[in-house]
Each structure stands twice: as C-alpha cells, then as structure tokens.
Amino acid sequence: MDKIEIKNLMYEYIQTDNKKKKALDNVNLTINKGEFIAVIGMNGSGKSTLARHLNGLLLPTAGSCIVDGLDTKNETTIWQVRQKVGMVFQNPDNQIIAAIVEDDVAFGPENLGIMPEEIRKRVTESLKAVNMEEKRNFAPHLLSGGQKQLIAIAGVLAMRTDYMVLDEPTAMLDPSGRAAVMEAVHKLHEKYGMTIILITHFMDEAISADRIIVMHDGKVAADGTPREIFSDVEKIRKLGLELPLASQMVHALRKRKIEISTDIYTDDELVKALQL
Ligand SMILES: Nc1ncnc2c1ncn2[C@@H]1O[C@H](COP(=O)(O)OP(=O)(O)O)[C@@H](O)[C@H]1O
Ligand SMILES: [Mg+2]
C-alpha cells in the first residue's frame, strides 16, 4: 500500500476557446516508497500536469491516482493525501508566505494543528537539514533564489511528508543555488528516506536519480535507470532531449578518434576515464 499508483490517467484542460487539450494520455505508473525518480521531457509533455495529480491539486478527467491506498478523488481523505505528498514549485517567490523564515517553515505544521513545542523542534531540525539554520530570523526577500527554495524544501520537511514532488525547482537558479538545492534533495532522500519525484530539464540532475521517467506528448515514453535511458542515444534525440554533459563529451572525443567508453554518464565517471 505504500506507493503512488497512477492508473489509466487522462487529463484534459479546457482552454480559453473552450477547446479541450489532452495533457495526459493514459498514463500508468507506480512510484514506490523510497525511490528517487527524475521526470524529464520536452516543454508541454505533461510533466507539471502529472506532478499536480500526485497530491490532488488536479483531479483526473479519467483514471485514478492512488496515494498509499487513498484515491485523490475522495474528498474525505484529500487532506491526508496532502500530508503525505509535499510540493515544491519552480518560482521561489511564489511559495513563501511569511515575513520571517522560521514562520514560513512553521506554516505547514501549524496548519496540521501540531503542538507549538513540536513545531519549534521541527523548524530547527528542518532548517538544519538544508543548512539554513543561521537564516531563521531573516526576512525571506533578503535571501537568494536558491536559499528561498531551500526554505520551501524545509517547509515540506517540517510537514514530515513521505513524498516530495519538486517541479523544476532549480530552473530559475544560478549554478551555486542549483547545487545547494540538489544537495538538499539528495540529503532528504538518503537521511530521511523521503521518496523524491524531481521534474527537471537538466540532464545532469536526472542522472543522479535511481529511475528516470520520460514524458512525451502526455504519455510515458520511457521508464528505466539513468543508464538504460541515456544509452539509447537515438531515442533520447527523438524525444527532443539531450545527453548529460559527460556523455556529450564522450561522443565528441570519439569523433576525434579518441578511444573512450560510451558507458560514461556522470562527470565523475568521465574524470576517472580520462586519468590515463
Ligand atoms: N492551464 C492550462 N490550460 C490549458 N492548457 C494547459 C494548461 N496548462 C498546461 N496546458 C497544456 O497541457 C500540456 C502539458 O502541459 P504541462 O503539464 O505544463 O507540460 P510540461 O510541464 O511538461 O511543460 C501542454 O500542451 C500545455 O500547453
Ligand atoms: Mg512544467
């Protein structure tokens, strides 16, 4: 029962001209507890629409989304679902509500009716987990985009959700902000056992997941380990995606007749292979 099951999921938006737009087309997926999943795919392939189904922000036009046995369409259990599945969005400015960092992190647990003493404990622990404890009395607008995302992540951690869905959380960040957010996300997975569903357009972020789901035109076009996904170069190109930077380097080197294995996907692997 500890999993998210998406069955024959279909979702249609009604556009302003009243025409229907099918954004998800018969998606079937199981997300197991403890997984670190990256979701990739071209713009408009349905990634955000899929993400918003996982905690019932959107409800299926047809089919279902079942979180630990709870159907998101069931109004009587939707709050339970929201306590299980936390969300972090792309724009760091749109998800901070309070005027002080610690109040923002406390907002979620406060809404759950948790005791003040327990909330204080969680706020401290969550800010520590993302290396932001020293900013706890700061005004969020004084923080960088990356730091704001870390606060949003701490807010989800303070709710103690089992699943965390992040919809392109690094898209608006500079490289150091991106690195800090990715480090925090990996820590939540490893240290707190949180199930991670990370939507990203950075292939170098996707490569660090245990499993990659590729969306294309509202459908699941591929589902496998990063190695399985990125070894099919032809398919990756057809789906409008790029290879991770290390793989691109390998192909460029091979074009110049430099002998190097094609089985290289991460920067670490590339560095190792080049140490002759
Ligand atoms: N609010 C909306 N109204 C109408 N169409 C939408 C809306 N949001 C998304 N779409 C359409 O649904 C499809 C999937 O969008 P989305 O899930 O945002 O894709 P992605 O996150 O992969 O870029 C796209 O064709 C997009 O134009
Ligand atoms: Mg999107």
Image: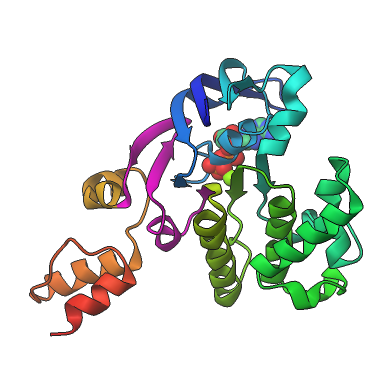
Residue in the picture at 31% in, 47% down: 225
Left or right: residue 204 compared with residue 131 = left
Left or right: residue 64 compared with residue 94 = left
Residue 16 is covered by the magenta coloring:
no
Residue in the picture at 22% in, 47% down: 232
**Residue 97 seen in this snapshot:** no
In this view, the residue farthest toward the front is: 117
Residue in the picture at 83% in, 53% down: 118
Residue 210 is covered by the magenta coloring:
yes
Residue 72 horizontal/vertical position (percent): 66, 23
Color encoding of the figure: rainbow
**Residue 113 seen in this snapshot:** yes
Q: How many marks?
A: 0
Left or right: residue 40 compared with residue 126 = left
Residue 193 horizontal/vertical position (percent): 53, 50
Q: Quadrant of the C terminus?
A: bottom left
Between 86 and 226, the residue placed more toward the observer is 86
Point out the stretch of residues depicted in magenta.
197-226
In this view, the residue farthest toward the bottom is: 276
Residue in the picture at 31% in, 66% down: 266
